[in-house]
Amino acid sequence: MTQHASTILMTGATGFLGQFLLRDLLLRGRRIVAILRAPPASAAERLAGMMQRLGFDVGPYVASGQLLLEHGSLPDELPPPRWGRTDEILSCAASLQLFSNGNGEPFRTNALGAEALIEWAKAHGVGRLHAVSTAYVCGCYKDRIGEVFHLRPPDFQTEYEFSKWLAEDHFARWGREPGHVLTILRPSFLIGDSRTGYTCQFGGFYQFARLVSLLRDQHADGGNGHGTFIPLRIPGREHDPIQNLVPIDFAARMVTEVVCNPSLQGRIYHLTDPRPPTWTDFKQWLEEYFNIYGGRFVDCDELSADRTPAESLLWEKYDLLMPRIHHHIRFDQANSLDVMRRLGITFPSLTRQRMFTLLDYAASQNWGARSKPGANGANGRAAAGRR
Ligand SMILES: NC(=O)c1ccc[n+]([C@@H]2O[C@H](COP(=O)([O-])OP(=O)(O)OC[C@H]3O[C@@H](n4cnc5c(N)ncnc54)[C@H](OP(=O)(O)O)[C@@H]3O)[C@@H](O)[C@H]2O)c1
């Protein structure tokens, strides 16, 4: 078998971030043992299909033994190391379920899963662990958030955030033991590829854009060539930054660089937008994209009653956005900026053009409802987007 730099046990390879990381780490020569959930055959097929959509054929890597597909699941079904020595663990699996609904998630996969991975690392002598967390483990703090472990915050906006905080807490205890090197990578909200728009997740930013497209469809008057007027109050301050959004290609590049370079490990990284656009930019771009106008910013309290149907559609259906509008967080990025400076990586800022690329792709996939994702290709024309 070919000699590879090191062997990484990876969870979450079939996820949005995981597929980009799998591709990039294989291209960098790492031997990856990917833990796939049951049923094993269809998981492997699913993985191959999603990698194909990224333009990447995993076949040769499986054939050469550089990529091993192992059945397993968190927290209680991690396989014994049949493949030999494991040098590092990349923890990228998670349940993104925001609140408990009786199935044990998100705590089962995220918190118990972290404990299980640590037990596995201890049992098999693994000394390096890279854990993908979230920038929002900071909970409801309002100040500048450092790239440090946080004391348990007074509150979290979601149980998902709490479960990820618990995971970090478990990892941190392991990281304090001698001979262990722990790296925590904390992206904010992931959005599509900044160059192609490709995404396989259509929550958050995309849901919001889809609601704007629904509003436009409800109010459009048959395409008379003019923009559609939709009077709408927008709860927020026009010069405030929008919620922190991070293109997947940037997050994947940063994680890959850190995983491939031991001198960058042992730190916490905020993978966040250093200068998010303002609400004014965001509003202008959405209005231009959907050819609508009529929105105006108001104080958050002004919207508490007497909402128009248009306002209800946007703000009630998207109620999770509301706390985020009130709750601005500034993420310190000293560690990330240091890596970016050293490696010449620039952040793909959300510009009008990039936003249109993201929206074009999402619209071409019918905002996630299309049965065969990627059917139109990464540069497919918007089917239901621009007017
Ligand atoms: N997406 C975001 O906006 C965002 C933002 C900040 C941080 N993050 C973090 O980034 C990481 C990757 O997120 P993502 O967006 O790529 O998530 P995703 O697309 O939902 O993928 C989740 C991955 O975890 C696997 N998984 C889920 N539960 C599992 C379990 N019990 N045992 C084993 N594997 C399990 C899934 O496998 P299946 O394919 O079998 O379901 C999938 O591979 C996570 O740690 C997440 O917390 C994500």
Image (tube, rainbow, N blue to C red):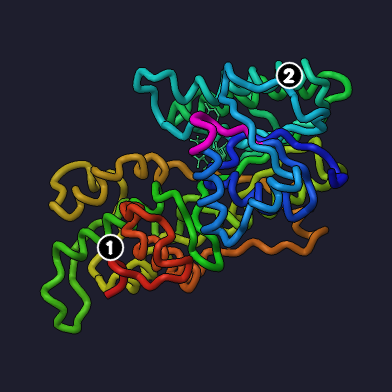
The dot on residue 173 is: 2
At horizontal 47% and vertical 55% (from top left) the residue drawn is 199
At horizontal 20% and vertical 50% (from top left) the residue drawn is 313
Residue 38, magenta (yes or no): yes
**Residue range highlighted in magenta:** 34-42
The dot on residue 296 is: 1
| Image quarter of the C terminus | bottom left
The percent coordinates of residue 246 (x first, y second) are 55, 54
At horizontal 53% and vertical 47% (from top left) the residue drawn is 16
**Neighbourhood count class around disc 1 (C-alpha, 10 Å): few under 14, some 14–19, many 20 upward:** some
**Neighbourhood count class around disc 2 (C-alpha, 10 Å): few under 14, some 14–19, many 20 upward:** few
The dot on residue 196 is: none
Say whether residue 124 is left or right of residue 50: right
Q: Is residue 80 above or below residue 280?
A: above
For badge 2, the amino acid type reads: Arg
- Does the image show residue 138? no
Quadrant in the rendering for residue 310: bottom left
Disc 1 residue: CB within 8 Å of ligand 1: no
The percent coordinates of residue 7 (x first, y second) are 79, 37
For badge 1, the amino acid type reads: Arg
